[in-house]
Every structure is written in structure tokens, then in C-alpha cells.
Image (spheres, coloured by chain):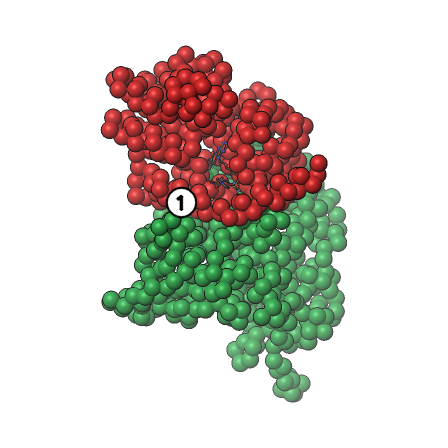
Chain colours: A red, B green
């Protein structure tokens, strides 16, 4: 029994896709901040992906993923009607959401999708949400329409200036922090360097900063220890203690080093996969 | 009388093994199993004691003398029936049980000679007599006429504890749903114990037997996340059994532990076994490539990790242990196999710190030399530091196999469950019932990391209690 893809949309062709998966039991339980472990086929790897949205009535969850290596490329080769072999979740601790005032949600790259689910949660809890999204250029922005549908304050930053502020999300964030007095929390989801930069920007303002760590995972249920991160000097497991942590306490250098652990093998997999694909056509 | 006196006790029949030099490079099973002749010769060594102590030594109380007698009569089906009466995973137990401290440890022959090779005989019977009608085997009734549509039981986790509960109850006609978080059922039998010691096809066969009995396996269902105990009670399950295992790996809390190249045994073995990393890149899950590997700990888990690393191509693999070889908790046979394959044992060394290069990758480990002191509360001699005596061991991979802590997922979602002071589930030793009525628990989540057979023993006690209440 697989997990059928009921809808697929290539948000950025060949690079970022959104899939809606039939998984009623997971949809019933999913909360913002949760993730799932997906395995595409018999020989596939278990890959963690954030639940970007869920529809409890339809029994579906939405995943947005960036094609970076073999597993995500294989996922992207599937179409509507196809099935994933395994979808396991919802995993991880849900985002802590309470009515707290002004919350700035910063999303970068594919992280915008995950951020959007969390921003929605904060809006529903009655918070004033300022969303900042960033990408290299305009064509790589995601979910802006969805975000603006519930979040009146949306700021955009692109590296090349093709839309919104020319530069990084952190510059926009700094601007806001300098003018707004009582920001209750900053949430950042995106590439590790971006989350690190956001944490560095907010540190002098002593604003609570939450980041979502994308450490390498194997089981996602606290059994292997692959996802361990140092937070405030303590070793914690991203899959059961997180994935969200206090950005001011995370050892980002260690996280970055650990993300490179299997680089050689990942490249080998990808190379083989691209070759196989070409043979097929 | 005179007959017995004349009887010369033959030596124990050796187990045929895959050649030590060759097997260090493949994942095929190490112990090859007895032939029919070898099994019969070994079975005839059994004295058929009036008071068979071996049976008391078995946590699921197999009628050992009975199955050996049937084997001597070449009644294989009879022998299998006897075993299956109390053990639903004989092919697994025959391979991985610590027989030397259980049945064989108590065998009367062992007092003066070598004990009967009970485990090997159990394996022979199970392998040779593959189940034909699973229903018949487990219930010792010829049909499942007792099927009851109105009763259902849920098991959380699909390790040996739950599998035993499922087999027992299904055999008595009760519908059992097993919910497993991973994508394959089997627990440690599939993600922990490597192929060369317990082939996955053997586990699959035993699981197939359970499916034939009507047990449904639901993989990718995380108890406490995808479904909670509360949900299960609301869905009308008459009883729930928790067999989620011991879970979270322990680390040493020493500097450098999160360097690239330092792994928990769980991660390493899960990658290789569940993810089939030994077939990478044909399978996608990678394992880390290393030349010099240090494994910390000396239990079965450590031996499995060390022997796996060797097979994955490491040049040099050492077991680093803070006590001496006599205190090693692993099964004797596994230690011997490891040494034969080339694993080096470094005793009386306690890890102090790990050191990395500028990219954050492990390069070496510093260990503290130890000597043996007085026995501690575990009854084993305690390791005592030799002041100032340290050594650097070069290594590019370290595997930490020093035990586990209870996994928090299900426990956090079920605050009503009473826990003991170590955080494991508190369960009645007779019935397995927890602080929640009709919710039972057993196996490693109750005892902490133990053995396959003790998990099965707990499953059996709980299943009996559940059946008594429901039927
Ligand atoms: C909790 C969590 C949520 C995530 N959510 C998303 C998401 O919503 N969208 C998205 O695009 N990505 C997400 N990721 C990252 C995603 O899991 C990786 O991009 C993916 O595993 C890459 O697999 P691959 O085989 O395609 O690439 P590979 O070639 O295997 O690896 C490329 C890079 O991905 C990372 N990676 C590889 N394997 C894993 C693994 N098993 N677990 C985590 N990271 C890995 C490493 O940094 C690696 O260098 C999330 C990660 C985590 C931990
Ligand atoms: C590497 C290794 C080697 C070993 N060698 C031996 C040996 O030679 N001989 C021996 O007797 N013993 C050995 N053991 C110990 C033995 O395997 C365990 O004691 C035994 O498997 C415990 O059984 P269990 O049913 O309690 O749990 P497990 O076998 O741990 O199974 C628990 C299952 O529950 C699942 N699970 C966990 N949490 C959840 C959740 N929330 N929801 C749903 N499912 C969940 C897990 O994924 C797992 O599949 C070894 C252990 C290891 C790790
Ligand atoms: S104790 Fe040994 S000799 Fe006696 S019945 Fe058991 S296996 Fe046979
Ligand atoms: S992914 Fe295995 S412990 Fe977190």
C-alpha cells in the first residue's frame, strides 16, 4: 500500500516541486513544524521533508522539495497518480505557537514552504505576522500568493534585485528590528547559512529566535542519533527534541560539517542516477 | 545402569562455519547450520534427564528434552511442534539466543563435559521444517475455528516482544494489528542484527508465518504520533501491547563526540541493515567509508558493529573496552567470531576525547588506560584509571555502542503511563500490565536493552494474560 500523489506542481521546473500526498492518518495529526520521512521505492533512502500544509478533510499533506540529489530527483520523477512507497509521520515536535504579539517569519529558498505553514499557525493564533521571503531571483520565489492570502505584511528580498529588496533577507529583518519595538519572536527556515545569519542579526536585539534544523536523519524517530546537534552545549536529537531550536544556542559550524558527511556517496548516487535517466530516453 | 556407564560421552558436534578469511568480506551467514547427520549425532548426546534443567534455563520454557527426543526419532514435525508450542520465532532464537547462559548453561552434561548444542538443534529443526500450516503450528489445534470477529488487539512496535504477542493471540483466533514506525517489521532483528548473523530471509519467513495466521502489519505508523494509545482505546481495541524496544542511543558525553565520523552503533547498523548500505550504490542509503575504525563497548551490539565495519571494507577494526575480556557482555561465540575475522580487542581503555581535523572529521581518539579493581554492583570487576596513562589511537571512524535510553516518542504522548526510575515502562512482572488497564508492555522498553528471548518471554506472559481475560 503506497501513498498516492494526488497533485503535483513543478514550482520551479526541474528544481522545486510541490506534491500533495494522500495520507489521511498523517493529515489528521499534522501540526505546523512537523515533518515526514519519505522513501520513494524499495531501494530508496528515507528522506525527511517538512509538512508544508495539510488538509484534514481531504486527508492530504503537502510537501515542497528542492531537487538536490538522487532521492529528491527520484521523487521529482514521479507524477500525479504515482505512489511513494513509504510516508511516515507526522514527526518532530510541532512549532510552539501561542498568542504572543508580533512574529517575524523569515523563509529562504525551499524553506519558504515550511515557513508558510508556521506563519499560518501564528496568524490563526492571533499574532501579527510579518513574513520575509528571500531567494536568489524572482523566479525562485515560492508561495508568495499563498502567503499574502493570509498575511498582509509580506516583504521580499532577492539577491539580484529582480523583486523587492536587492540583497539578503537579513537586511530586511534588520530594518524591521530597528523600527519595531516589541517583536516577540523571529522564526527562520531555510538554508543553514541563512538561519545562522538571522540568528546573528537578532542576537543583539535579544529577540527569541527559532530555527528549524535540517540535519541528516536516518530513522526520524530517535533511534539512530544521526540527527544530533549541539544546542546550548548539550547534544540534542533534531528528530525528537526538534527540529526547531533556539537559534542563539545552535552550534551551526558543527551542523554544517555534519551535513557534508556523505558527500562522496551522494555524488556517486547522483551521477549514476543521471546516467540511468539518460539511458531511458 | 550398566548401559549408561558404558556410554562414552562424545564431544559436542562442531558447527560448520563459512571460512573466517572469506567471510570477513561478505554478508552471507557465518554459521552454516548442521546437516541432518550432524543434528542426529548431536541430538543423541542428550541424556533425556528426568529433571531437565535446560528447560528451566529457557525464558520461554521450551520442552527441550521433548523436542530432542522427537529429533532422535527423526520425527522432524514432532520436534518442530514441540518448539512452536512455546516459541514463535525458533529460527531466530536458534541463531541469536545466548544459550551458553540459558538452556545450555544449565544442561547437566555441561557439568563434566560440553553441554548439548541446544541452540544449534533448535535452528536445525526450525530451518528444516519450515512452517506448512502456521495455524496448526502455533495453536497445536488443527484449525483456527476459534476465530473471533469481536475481539481485536493492537501491538505497538514489531520487534520480538510484539511478534510473540501477535503470534500467540492470532493463534487463538484474535485479530491482531501490529503498528511499526519503520518501513519494515522485525525490530532489532532487521535493523540491528546483521545479515551475516541473522539473514533477513529467515526473519521474513517467520513474519510470513504470522501473516498467514491473520496478523496485519501496519508499517510507517508511529505510536504516539500517527496513532496514540488513546486513539486505539477509542477505536475499540480490547487490549494494547507496547513493545517499542529501548530506542535512543547513549553517547559518552566526551569532547568531540559530534565530529563527522563518530556514529552510534544504531545509526551505523541501521544504515547497513535496514538501508542495505552494503549494497550501495545499488541501494541509496550510504554508510561512511573508513579505514581505521574504533568500536567503543563490548556487547553484542559492539561485536556486530565491528564485524560489519570489517565487511564494509575497513583495514583495521578495534574494540575498545574499559574492562577486561572476561567482563565483555557479548556472547562468547560472537567475540570468538570477531577475533577470528581480524577484529582487534583493546581492553582496559576508556575513551576520553575525540579529535578532528579542520573540516570537523574524526582523526584520533584519546583513551585512558585502566586496571581492574574491586567488583562493582554488577558483580564485574570495576575499571580503575591509571593516572596519567593515556594513549592516542588514530581512527577515522568511531562507533559508540554503550547502550540505549528509553525512546521518548510514545511515552511523551502517553503521560498516564507509569515509568520506573530509569524511565522505562513499569509493568507487572507476571502479567505485563502497565498502570493503564488493559495496556500491556514488555521487552526492552520495560527491562532496558536485554535479549530477544527475554522480550519474547515477556510477550508470552502478556499474551497469555490477554487471552485469559478476553476468551
Ligand atoms: C526535518 C527536516 C525537514 C526538511 N524539510 C525539507 C523540505 O521541506 N524541503 C526540502 O527541499 N528539503 C527539506 N529537508 C532537506 C532534505 O531532507 C534533503 O534535501 C534531502 O534529504 C536530500 O536528499 P537527496 O538524496 O536528494 O540528496 P543527497 O545527494 O543525498 O544530499 C544532498 C544534501 O542533503 C542533505 N541530506 C542528505 N541526506 C539527508 C537526510 N537523510 N536527511 C537530511 N538531510 C540530508 C545533506 O546536506 C546533503 O549534503 C529537510 C530536512 C530535515 C532534517
Ligand atoms: C545490534 C544488536 C545485536 C543484538 N544481538 C543480540 C543477540 O545476539 N542475542 C539476543 O538475544 N539479543 C540481541 N540483541 C538484543 C535484542 O535484539 C533485543 O533485546 C530485542 O530485540 C528486544 O525486543 P523488543 O521487541 O523489546 O524491541 P525491538 O526489537 O527493539 O523492536 C521494537 C520495534 O518497535 C519500533 N518502534 C519504536 N518506537 C515505536 C513507536 N513509537 N511506534 C511504533 N513502533 C515503534 C521499532 O522501530 C522496532 O521495530 C541485540 C541488539 C542489537 C541492537
Ligand atoms: S539438561 Fe542437557 S542432557 Fe539433560 S535433557 Fe536438557 S539438553 Fe538433554
Ligand atoms: S534521525 Fe535517527 S535519531 Fe534522529
Q: Quadrant of residue A1?
A: top right
Q: Is residue B369 left or right of residue A22?
A: left
Q: Residues within 10 Å of mark 1 (few under 14, many from 20)?
A: some
**Image quadrant in which the C terminus of chain A is located:** top right
- Depth check: give the residue in front, A27 or B270: B270
Q: Which residue is depicted at the point 31% across and 52% down?
A: B255
Tell me the SS state at disc 1: helix
Q: Which residue is depicted at the point 50% across and 61% down?
A: B314
- Give percent across and percent down for residue B470: 60, 41
Chain of residue at mark 1? A
Is residue B128 in view?
A: yes
Q: Is residue B82 left or right of residue B443?
A: right
Q: Which residue is label 1 attached to? A: A257
Image vertical order of residue A101 relative to residue B30, above or below = above
Q: Quadrant of residue A176?
A: top left
- Give percent across and percent down for residue A54: 53, 24
Is residue B231 in view?
A: no
- Depth check: give the residue in front, A46 or B384: A46
Q: Which residue is depicted at the point 74% across and 44% down?
A: B145
- Depth check: give the residue in front, B55 or A205: A205
- Count of marks placed on residues: 1
- Give percent across and percent down for residue B14: 62, 75
Amino acid at each position: 500500500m503506497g501513498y498516492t500523489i494526488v497533485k503535483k506542481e513543478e514550482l520551479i521546473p526541474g528544481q522545486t516541486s510541490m506534491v500533495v500526498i494522500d495520507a489521511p492518518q498523517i493529515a489528521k495529526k499534522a501540526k505546523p513544524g512537523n515533518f515526514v520521512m519519505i522513501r520513494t521505492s524499495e531501494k530508496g533512502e528515507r528522506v525527511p521533508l517538512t509538512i508544508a500544509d495539510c488538509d484534514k478533510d481531504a486527508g492530504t499533506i503537502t510537501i515542497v522539495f528542492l531537487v538536490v540529489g538522487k532521492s529528491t530527483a527520484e521523487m521529482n520523477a514521479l507524477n500525479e497518480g504515482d505512489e511513494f512507497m513509504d510516508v511516515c509521520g507526522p514527526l518532530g515536535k510541532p512549532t510552539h505557537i501561542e498568542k504572543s504579539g508580533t512574529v517575524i517569519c523569515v523563509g529562504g529558498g525551499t524553506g519558504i514552504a515550511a515557513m508558510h505553514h508556521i506563519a499560518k499557525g501564528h496568524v490563526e493564533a492571533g499574532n501579527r505576522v510579518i513574513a520575509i521571503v528571500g531567494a536568489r531571483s524572482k523566479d525562485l520565489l515560492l508561495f508568495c500568493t499563498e502567503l499574502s492570502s493570509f498575511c498582509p505584511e509580506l516583504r521580499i528580498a532577492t539577491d539580484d534585485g529582480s523583486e523587492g529588496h536587492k540583497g539578503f533577507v537579513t537586511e530586511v529583518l534588520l530594518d524591521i528590528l530597528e523600527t519595531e519595538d516589541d517583536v516577540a519572536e523571529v522564526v527562520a527556515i531555510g538554508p543553514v547559512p541563512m538561519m545562522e545569519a538571522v540568528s546573528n542579526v537578532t542576537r543583539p536585539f535579544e529577540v527569541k529566535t527559532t530555527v528549524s534544523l535540517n540535519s541528516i536523519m536516518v530513522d526520524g524517530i530517535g533511534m539512530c542519533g544521526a540527527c544530533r546537534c549541539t544546542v546550548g552545549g548539550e547534544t540534542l536529537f533534531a528528530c525528537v527534541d526538534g527540529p526547531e531550536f533556539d537559534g542563539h544556542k545552535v552550534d551551526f559550524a558543527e551542523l554544517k560539517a555534519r551535513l557534508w558527511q556523505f558527500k562522496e556517496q551522494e555524488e556517486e548516487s547522483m551521477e549514476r542516477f543521471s546516467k540511468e535517466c539518460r539511458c531511458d530516453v | 545402569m550398566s548401559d549408561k556407564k558404558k556410554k562414552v560421552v562424545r564431544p559436542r558436534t562442531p558447527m560448520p562455519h563459512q571460512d573466517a578469511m572469506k567471510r570477513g568480506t561478505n554478508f552471507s551467514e557465518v554459521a552454516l547450520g548442521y546437516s541432518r547427520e550432524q543434528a542426529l549425532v548431536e541430538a543423541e548426546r542428550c541424556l533425556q534427564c528426568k529433571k531437565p534443567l535446560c528447560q528451566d534455563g529457557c525464558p520461554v520454557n521450551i520442552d527441550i528434552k521433548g523436542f530432542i527426543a522427537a529429533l532422535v526419532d527423526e520425527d522432524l514435525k514432532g520436534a518442530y511442534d514441540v518448539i512452536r508450542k512455546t516459541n514463535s520465532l525458533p529460527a531466530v532464537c536458534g541463531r541469536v539466543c545466548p544459550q551458553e547462559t540459558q538452556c545450555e548453561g544449565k544442561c547437566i552434561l555441561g557439568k563434566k563435559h560440553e553441554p548439548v548444542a541446544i541452540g544449534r538443534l533448535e535452528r536445525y529443526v526450525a530451518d528444516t521444517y519450515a512452517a506448512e500450516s502456521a495455524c496448526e503450528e502455533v495453536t497445536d489445534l488443527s484449525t483456527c475455528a476459534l476465530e473471533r470477529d469481536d475481539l481485536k488487539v493492537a501491538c505497538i512496535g514489531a520487534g520480538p516482544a510484539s511478534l510473540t504477542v501477535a503470534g500467540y493471540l492470532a493463534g487463538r483466533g484474535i485479530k491482531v494489528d501490529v503498528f511499526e514506525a519503520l518501513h519494515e517489521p522485525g525490530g532489532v532483528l532487521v535493523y540491528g542484527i546483521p545479515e551475516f548473523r541473522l539473514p533477513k530471509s529467515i526473519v521474513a519467513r517467520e513474519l510470513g508465518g504470522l501473516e498467514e495466521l491473520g496478523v496485519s502489519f501496519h508499517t510507517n505508523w508511529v505510536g504516539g504520533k500517527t496513532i496514540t494509545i488513546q486513539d486505539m482505546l477509542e477505536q475499540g481495541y480490547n487490549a494494547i501491547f507496547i513493545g517499542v524496544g529501548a530506542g535512543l542511543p547513549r553517547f559518552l558525553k566526551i569532547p568531540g563526540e559530534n565530529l563527522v565520523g563518530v556514529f552510534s552503533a544504531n545509526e551505523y547498523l541501521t544504515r547497513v541493515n535496514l538501508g542495505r548500505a552494503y549494497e550501495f550504490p545499488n541501494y541509496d542509503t550510504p554508510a561512511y567509508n573508513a579505514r581505521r575504525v574504533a568500536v567503543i563497548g563490548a556487547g553484542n551490539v559492539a561485536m556486530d558493529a565491528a564485524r560489519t565495519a570489517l565487511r564494509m571494507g575497513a583495514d583495521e577494526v578495534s574494540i575498545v573496552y574499559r574492562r577486561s575480556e572476561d567482563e565483555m557482555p557479548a556472547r562468547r561465540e560472537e567475540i570468538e567470531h570477531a577475533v577470528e575475522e581480524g577484529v582487534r580487542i583493546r581492553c582496559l581503555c576508556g575513551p576520553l576525547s575525540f579529535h578532528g581535523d579542520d573540516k570537523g572529521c574524526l582523526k584520533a581518539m584519546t583513551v585512558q588506560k585502566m586496571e581492574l579493581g574491586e567488583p562493582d554492583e554488577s558483580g564485574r570487576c570495576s575499571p580503575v584509571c591509571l593516572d596519567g596513562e593515556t594513549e592516542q589511537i588514530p581512527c577515522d571512524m568511531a562507533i559508540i555502542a554503550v547502550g540505549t535510553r528509553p525512546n521518548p516518542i510514545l511515552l511523551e504522548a502517553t503521560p498516564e503511563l507509569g515509568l520506573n526510575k530509569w524511565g522505562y515502562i513499569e509493568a507487572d512482572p507476571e502479567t505485563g500490565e502497565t498502570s493503564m488497564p488493559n495496556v500491556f508492555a514488555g521487552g526492552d522498553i520495560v527491562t532496558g536493552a536485554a535479549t530477544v528471548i527475554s522480550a519474547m518471554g515477556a510477550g508470552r506472559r502478556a499474551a497469555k494474560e490477554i487471552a485469559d481475560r478476553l476468551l
